[in-house]
Amino acid sequence: MLLNGTLLSAPIFLITPPFTQLNTPYPATAYLKGFFNTKGISAVQADLGIEVTIALFCKEGLENLFKSIQEKQLNKTAPLLLSENSARIFALKEVYIKTIDQVISFLQGKSNTLAHLICTRNFLPEASRFEQLDNLNWAFGSMGKQDMAKHIATMYLEDLSDLIKENIDEHFGFSRYAESLGRSANSFDDLYNALQKPFTYLDEILIKILDARLKEVNPKLVCLSVPFPGNLYTSLRCAQWVKQYYPSTKVAMGGGFANTELRSLSDARVFEFYDFITLDDGEAPLEILIEHLDGKKQQHELKRCFTLVNGVVTYINNTNCSDYKQGQVGTPDYDGLLLDKYISAIEVINPMHSLWSDGRWNKLTMAHGCYWGKCTFCDISLDYIKSYEPIAASLIVDRMEELIAKTGEHGFHFVDEAAPPSLMKSVAIEIIKRKIIVSWWANVRFEKSFTRDLCLLLKAAGCIAVSGGLEVASDRLLDLIDKGITVAQVAKVSKHFSDAGIMVHAYLMYGFPTQTVQETVDSLEMVRQLFETGTLQSAFWHLFTMTAHSPVGLNPEKYKVKKVTEEIGTFANNDIEHIDSTGANHEIFGFGLKKALLNYMHGACFELPLQKWFEFKIPKTSVPPDYILKAISVPEINATNHYKAIWVGVMPTTTIVQRSKKGTKWEEMNLHFQTNKTAFDISLAPAVGNWLLHLLSKLSIENGNGLTYTEIKESYAKQGLDGFELCWDNKPITNLYKAGLLSV
């Protein structure tokens, strides 16, 4: 059968192996299926992570789990000795079995009224995870029942996870599996040896589901997406099964793990499991691979592809074949994924983390790559960062509308490395123009371009949150990172987002090369002030990791660090162990930094000296106590000539009012503005008021793209009015941003 020139002998099976996320599908297979749709290539997709999860965490699944543990206990050759925690869970097994289906249904959004019962703390059994539970009223308040219940239910599942790890499968984890085997695995030995062992309990569940799907689909090619080390092992188990029992089916692997870790792959044993491993964007490489399997392309025509040639791992890259532009790859297609089965969990009481793990989000990108592409800790030498290509705003919103129609979900997570401010503005205008209701969030750089008015525009278009890298809150280190920002700039931009009602999450880093103890303490003080002033709402500390494809990894001597070894492994090569002889002992700060941050996120303990967070002596901060307050109080420079004015509010109503004073009478026009939260009036001379009414109509997004400052000034003069600057640059017009008059 031929369709659009492509031979379709059998469908392509796109698989995300366990485990990535439980609340929403990882988007790689949906992206590829959307592309294949444009080429007439038949493709089926599955997220085996959610399928394994719901098979394990159900009444029958727990009955089998407890039965398996009991059988191990009765095994006289290797009896299982339960820990105190496992013994407690096992003793309460009937309660777990009785409640599991209701808990999963609640986390799937199908039994919301169960939240009240869960919050009583008498409905669900509690084991060791609850010993570390934060004060829930402090964390969620008296009214946050749904979120509180999700957190309690998540801890309930984590208790069961601990039971599984301790007694059944040491590698189990909800969002990762056997991650320690895949992370920085310079040698394939540990993984290979693990794959020679009998199936684990989780392997059995996975392979049973996989085999049923393989029989149903009968694919010619299985494509396994491996974005993280935490689903590498399971991808190998899936590939192993396909190779053994479906020898005519070829297996390909791609994704973020391959793109960063496997660029110097040389171990031939890997190809006992995969036939092909592709790098970077998968559309063109997979299209050529399919044509190769159909006999239409020769092996040497493959693109960015590892395969075995005469027993030797060989990288083939046909540079004559171009990649597809982002406007050509189609709309992600989630068809076939079990969208109603995903589980919303709240594991960490962190506002941004709850967005990541709570709720179903359609995932899109505004641009391929990063428009900045300079940060020295980042893999900027790799294609997914360095090849920047934005997508037209109209096409992005087309895709949003298409996904809403297909999935019924109005929530979007833009997964860009950093969404460009100018494109975010265009997307926001397009959303407002089309009058669609969406909630969305994105990763950004804290650019000066994010003015007060731009943030208000983004909020009007449904933006609910942004996350961005503050990294080490030190201007010296930000300069060394080549971040292109200062702490004061981050504070100012974050204040604009926060004032607009958009939540701000900051990625924080400690342990960057040459970072001193004093800089670590000062960085924490900056963070304390950012939260105290309400500038940040969420953050997370990460310990710096040196990677092979970053400027630090490529030129360590420039950053005064040394690689522990120069050896390149035969398998994964990305994270590099290094020695920072000029900096602090970074690891010892981790616990104190995170403990302080947890309190700051909940508006607590701002008055405590920083020393309270550490069990060892630290120097006093050198940061002035009002540093951030002063930074966010600096007025914005008037740059009206660079922007256009637009109107996103509701047109005002008007009345003519008679005024008199000391025998003098005159008329004023009262303009009454309504917003979603409040209402207010302004009074102008009737001629000026009529001009403003006409102007607001012209500035409405539905009527165009706004007017420049010069065009507005000219329209004022055409009405025969004098004193434009006195009118435009002073109250009451300068306050109309509150009603929707924005300069962006």
Image (cartoon, rainbow, N blue to C red):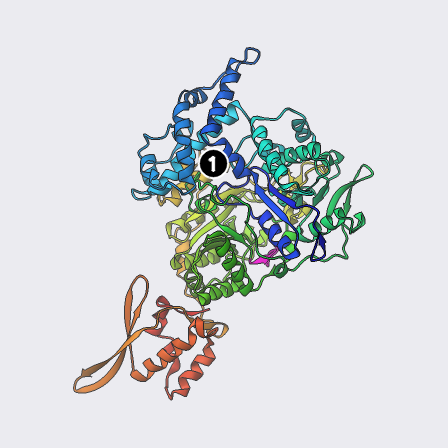
Return the residue at label 1: 591
Q: Position of residue 698 (x, y in %)?
A: 42, 77
Quadrant of the rendered structure where residue 99 is?
A: top left
Which residue ends up furthest to the left in the rendered image?
Answer: 663
Residue type for callout 1: Phe
Q: Is residue 522 visible?
A: no
On the image, which quarter does residue 104 sit in? top left
Image location (x, y in percent) of residue 30: 58, 49
User: Which one is in front, 581 or 376?
Assistant: 376
| Dominant secondary structure (helix, strand or loop) of the stretch shown in magenta | loop
Name the residue rendered at 45%, 77% in the picture.
709
Please indicate, yes or no, whether residue 703 appears anywhere in the rendered image.
yes
Q: Is residue 668 left or right of residue 562?
A: left
Pointer 1: residues within 10 angstroms few (<14), some, or many (20+)?
Answer: some
660 versus 268 height, above or below: below
Q: Which residues are magenta?
A: 366-374
Q: SS at mark 1?
A: helix
In this rendering, the answer to whether 678 lies above or below 235 is: below
Q: Position of residue 659 (x, y in %)?
A: 20, 82
